[in-house]
Amino acid sequence: MRPKLSIKSSLASLVSEQRQALLKDLTTAERALLAYTWEAWARPSQLPPSGDWRIWLFLAGRGAGKTRAVGAPARRAARRHAHRPGGADRGRCA
């Protein structure tokens, strides 16, 4: 089941003092993870579908975030398979 709000939207819905307190309590590593994790900032419609699938049709108009939405999971998959036999062991996907 997809979340109804992105983490960005959830943070934005907090009162300024609550948001600042929450962010202040994060470690440096947690802040970096929050800043650079696509799933934290993606709208729910930009996240890949759940389940076992091979093809994802992302039909949307200009400015919908298609490139980033598809690129982030592709980059993660490439990194996950980079050191497997037959994988992209020289820093490339194919």
Image (cartoon, grey):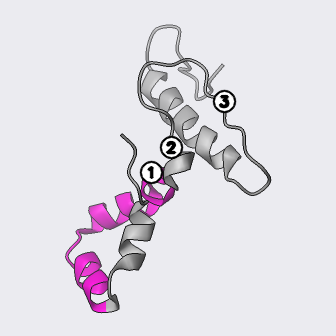
Task: Judge depth for marks 1 and 3 and give the one in front.
Answer: 3
Q: Secondary structure at mark 3?
A: loop
The answer to whether residue 25 is above or below residue 81 is below
- Give the position of the C terminus as an image quadrant: top right
Q: Residue at x 61, y 27 (%)?
A: 56
Question: Image check: 2 left or right of 91?
Answer: left
Q: Residue at x 38, y 61 (%)?
A: 34
Quadrant of residue 13 in the image?
A: bottom left
The magenta region covers 17-42
Tell me whether the residue at label 1 lies in contact with that at label 2, contact meaning CB atoms closer than 8 angstroms: yes
Density class for disc 1 (Cα within 10 Å; few <14, some 14-19, many ≥20) is some
Instruction: Give the residue furthest to the right.
Output: 62
Rendered image: mark on residue 47: 2
The answer to whether residue 85 is above or below residue 15 is above
Label 1 vs 3, first from the N-terminus:
1
- Give the position of the N terminus as an image quadrant: top left
Q: Residue at x 28, y 91 (%)?
A: 17
Task: Judge depth for marks 1 and 2 and give the one in front.
Answer: 2
Is residue 15 shown in magenta? no
Q: Secondary structure at mark 2?
A: loop
Amino acid of disc 2: Leu
Question: Image check: 18 left or right of 6?
Answer: left
**Separation (CA) of disc 3 from disc 2:** 12 Å
Tell me whether the residue at label 1 lies in contact with that at label 3, contact meaning CB atoms closer than 8 angstroms: no
Q: Which residue is mark 1?
A: 39
Q: Which residue is mark 3?
A: 57
Amino acid of disc 1: Glu
Magenta stretch secondary structure, dominant: helix
Amino acid of disc 3: Leu
Is residue 40 shown in magenta? yes
Tell me residue 45's x, y (percent): 55, 48
